[in-house]
Image: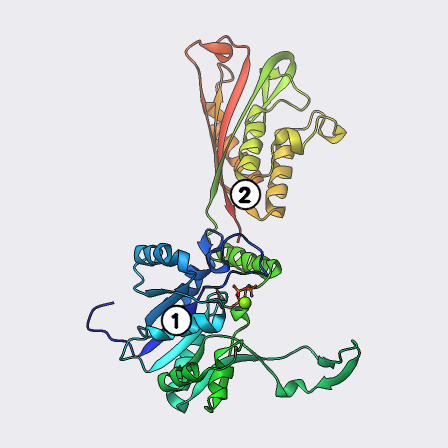
Amino acid sequence: MPDDVRPSVAVIVVAAGSGTRLGRPEPKAFVEIDGRSILSRSIDSVRGMSEPVSLIVVVPAALVGAASAQLDERRMPAVVVAGGDTRQRSVAAGIEVLAPEVEVVLVHDAARAFTPPEVFDRVVAAVRDRGHGVIPGLPVTDTIKGVADDGTVRDTIDRSQLTAVQTPQGFPRAHIVEAYALAAADFTDDAALVREAGHPVGVVAGSALSFKITTADDLERADDLIRRRSAAAAPALPRTGVGVDAHAFDATAELWLAGLHWPGEAGLAGHSDGDVVAHAICDALLGASGLGDLGSRFGTADPTLAGAHGEVFLQRTREILEAAGFRVGNVSVQVIGNRPRFAPRKTEADALLSGVLGAPVSVSATTTDGLGSAGRGEGLTAIATALVHPSS
Ligand code: CTP
Ligand code: MG
């Protein structure tokens, strides 16, 4: 914040509680959700406000240094002070360090890590507009019963008269300073204290996202929220895969390669027709989509696949991918071996395979200068790479 900006709004974020009900070793505000602390997530909301504010962060005494360093690192100017043994004492510690030019004070629970910045803006605007305290609240949707000491239901409380109250709670500086100076008892929120001092407090719309992380269940809810948000924000990047297949020649069999019949050429041994091109493509596609491989998807025990041509595997692989939400981007495959001479039928092979997969497939072939099993003419190998697109 430049030196000449002197905000008239201060936000006190109270983060000094131990989080007994959450039951974690570290203080609650320092518990991380997907790599970032509850406190830093709350501060993000303050940062999202439409006007610059003066930030005061109240933390356990032992963590003042660490929290200041973290805020500095994130270029978030803030005054960090040590809290007390009740929430009210922690808020009081924040009030102690208000800058002189501050006119509106918001107090926010760090534990409400997902409060939208608009709620902060709404509270500030309403405090200025009405000239008194304002708290965000939500209508109560459950039916609420009064229960007697003996555990029996006494009455049903008219829920239209009720509001579930959240933070940030905002007040004219004079009201909250006076209320804290007069505070005789301990209250669970600031509005109660300000009302006790005789000042009115109004309500504005809160947010369901402002839920307070109190128990392990709440933390799980927070985790789910982050996961859903990152899934929605993450671009669905294309994925690549690789597949290799090799079969030995079997002079007594017909050759089927790249989905084509090659009369007069030595065939390939295998449970199916041994089409290494089709098989390598299937593995590349399944691998790119994280859906296993040929062996795990099409067992040799399946009688419908005995002698099946490559097209059958490709067609079924395409169906598996599409059912899982992927579509084929493109495939490139290379055959390694001395025979057959592939070039004269490349166009035919590309067209056939592209048709089956509904995406461009390009097949090429190479020899190995006499090296290895391919060079000795023992069989054929194919290597395929594939690109797939998650459809979301
Ligand atoms: N708080 C605080 N100082 C305290 C107690 C609470 O600053 N002595 C803060 C908490 O860090 C939290 C907010 O007040 O952000 C709301 O309190 P609560 O949810 O009750 O948190 P804890 O008191 O930490 O949790 P618990 O009551 O389960 O111990
Ligand atoms: Mg508490």
For residue 93, the mark is 1
Label 2 sits on residue: 358
* Rendered view: 148 above or below 131: above
| Residue 88 coordinates in the image, percent (x, y) | 47, 74
User: At label 2, which amino acid type do we have?
Assistant: Gly
In-front residue for pair 177/227: 177
Secondary structure of the residue carrying numbered label 2: loop
Quarter of the rendered image showing ligand 2: bottom right
In-front residue for pair 85/138: 85
Is 257 positioned to the left or the right of 49 in the image? right
* Rendered image quadrant of residue 157: bottom right
In the current view of this chain or complex, which residue is farthest to the front? 184
| Residue 240 coordinates in the image, percent (x, y) | 48, 38
* Rendered view: 31 above or below 347: below
Q: Residue at x 63, y 42 (%)?
A: 320
| Residue 119 coordinates in the image, percent (x, y) | 45, 76
| Residue 168 coordinates in the image, percent (x, y) | 45, 75
Is residue 326 visible in the rendered image? The answer is: yes
Q: Residue at x 36, y 86 (%)?
A: 174
In the current view of this chain or complex, which residue is farthest to the left? 4
Is 239 positioned to the left or the right of 286 in the image? left
User: At label 1, which amino acid type do we have?
Assistant: Ala
Binning the other alpha carbons within 10 Å of mark 1 as few (below 14), some (14 to 19) or many (20 upward) gives: many
* Rendered view: 249 above or below 271: above
Count of marks placed on residues: 2
Binning the other alpha carbons within 10 Å of mark 2 as few (below 14), some (14 to 19) or many (20 upward) gives: some
- Quadrant where the N terminus sits is bottom left
